[in-house]
Amino acid sequence: MFKKGMRILFAAVAAAPLLVSTAWAEGLMTIIVNDPSNPYWYTEGEVAKATAEKLGYTATVGAHKGDTNTESNLIDTAITNKSVAIILDPANADGSVGAVKKAVAAGIPVFLVNAEINQEGLAKAQLVSNNAQGAALGATQWVESVGQEGNYVELFGAPSDNNAATRSNGYETVLTQYPDLVKAAREVADWDRTKGHAKMQSMLQANPDIIGVISGNDEMALGAIAALKEAGKLSGIKVGGFDGSPDAVAAIKAGDLQYTVLQPVAIFSEEAVKQADNFIKTGETGAKSEKQLFDCLLITKDNVDKYTAPFVLSE
């Protein structure tokens, strides 16, 4: 397991001195993320790009926005452009397998970040947050916030992303230990703030007595908070998030959000590029296994002041 203290800042990644000569590292590294309008995925792409450039590569960042056809087209472009490696946040656990196979068949090593695919042995590495560990952290804090009895609702991420089910199952493992906490509803909001807002409105109308909302990510949680504010209900309903986004941190400071679970996206995005660089040079990633988990950290009002940069919490 990688070191949990997150002292690595995005600025440091961008400003660090060149570690290898460009003679070793010439070539294009293609980085494909989900949707950079979400600050989490924006950070993922920018950190990976900065790290690649620091190592002497040229780098491009593209976005598939959860669409496997767009993802496939971006992979085709990476192949045409003779990329030396691809850093990919896959669009779909099953649907992205074909795109990865296509890149591998073209002789391009693929390194997955943030989300997995449902086939091992294709990507050289799959670097993801320890979502089960993070969900347990979040659910435990959520119970501390809402208490041990009452009705609550859940906002679920994109079903095509294994992270959504892993987090939901992690919540369930903790919350089922409290039989007087009853899940009144669960709605899919696809990691999206606007959808989180709409789903929260409908769930609140159907379940006006809820005491809390547990969310699969910060964007959905922030949408829920907006809906609860509009309904004048936020003071009596506690909301928890997941990601560690700057907006979520601001909401914690404002007292609107109880906590967020910080995913170390800056850490594993940098590490994926470093492993790609190792593989290009030596034929080995330097990691012990293909699948690698990075532990999450909890941000609450008690430690929010230690949040020093996007998705970074100091020790």
Image (cartoon, rainbow, N blue to C red):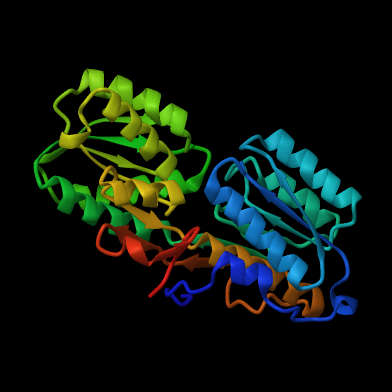
Instruction: From the viewer's side, name the closer residue of 312 and 84.
Output: 312
- Residue at left 60%, top 43%? 94
Q: Is residue 117 visible from the viewing direction of this image?
A: no
Instruction: From the viewer's side, name the closer residue of 268 and 293.
Output: 268
Compared across the picture, whether 99 is left or right of 299 comes to right
Q: Quadrant of the C terminus?
A: bottom left
Compared across the picture, whether 207 is left or right of 201 comes to left
Q: Position of residue 105 (x, y in %)?
A: 82, 55
Q: Position of residue 234 (x, y in %)?
A: 22, 33
Vertical relation: 301 (above or below) 1: above
- Residue at left 20%, top 23%? 207
Vertical relation: 18 (above or below) 229: below
Question: How many labels, in total?
Answer: 0
Compared across the picture, whether 296 is left or right of 240 comes to right
Compared across the picture, whether 289 is left or right of 299 comes to right
Vertical relation: 60 (above or below) 237: below
- Residue at left 40%, top 37%? 220
Q: Is residue 43 visible from the viewing direction of this image?
A: yes
Q: Position of residue 284 (x, y in %)?
A: 72, 77
- Residue at left 38%, top 43%? 216
Instruction: From the viewer's side, name the closer residue of 139 and 36.
Output: 36
Q: Position of residue 30 (x, y in %)?
A: 77, 55
Vertical relation: 249 (above or below) 26: above
